[in-house]
Image: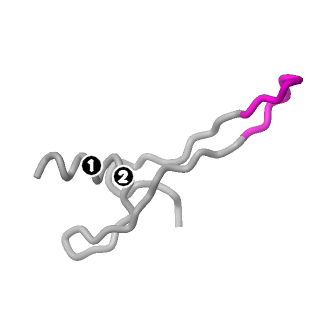
């Protein structure tokens, strides 16, 4: 299953770590996904959306 938020659609991003000789090594930065039950369905939701939903209640 894809590492994407089911609500906002946000996924992982690419970043680069640079060594002392300035060689670029690509790395993937994943978002913080949690599995929650919303309206009786199990969804993968990022923590930013969890905080937003808690604020709007």
| Residue 39 in which image quadrant | bottom left
Which residue is found at the position 44% from the left and 58% from the top?
33
Is residue 15 left or right of 7 when viewed as pictured?
right
Extreme bottom residue here?
40
**Secondary structure beneath disc 1?**
helix
Residue marked by disc 1: 51
**Cα distance in 3D space between marks 1 and 2:** 6 Å
- Residue 47 — which label? 2
- In depth, the one of 41 and 21 nearer the eye is 21
Q: What range is drawn magenta here?
A: 17-26
> Is residue 41 positioned above or below 26 on the image?
below
Q: Position of residue 6 (x, y in %)?
A: 37, 58
Extreme left residue here?
57
Q: Position of residue 57 (x, y in %)?
A: 10, 52
Q: Position of residue 2 (x, y in %)?
A: 52, 61
Instruction: Decide whether residue 21 is among the magenta residues.
Output: yes
Extreme right residue here?
21
| Residue 25 in which image quadrant | top right
- Residue 40 — which label? none
| Residue 22 in which image quadrant | top right
> Is residue 6 positioned above or below 48 on the image?
below
């Amino acid at each position: 299953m894809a590492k994407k938020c089911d609500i906002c659609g946000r996924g992982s991003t690419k970043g680069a770590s640079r060594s002392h000789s300035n060689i670029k090594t690509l790395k993937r930065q994943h978002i913080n996904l949690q599995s929650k039950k919303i309206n009786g369905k199990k969804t993968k939701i990022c923590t930013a959306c969890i905080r937003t939903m808690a604020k709007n209640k």
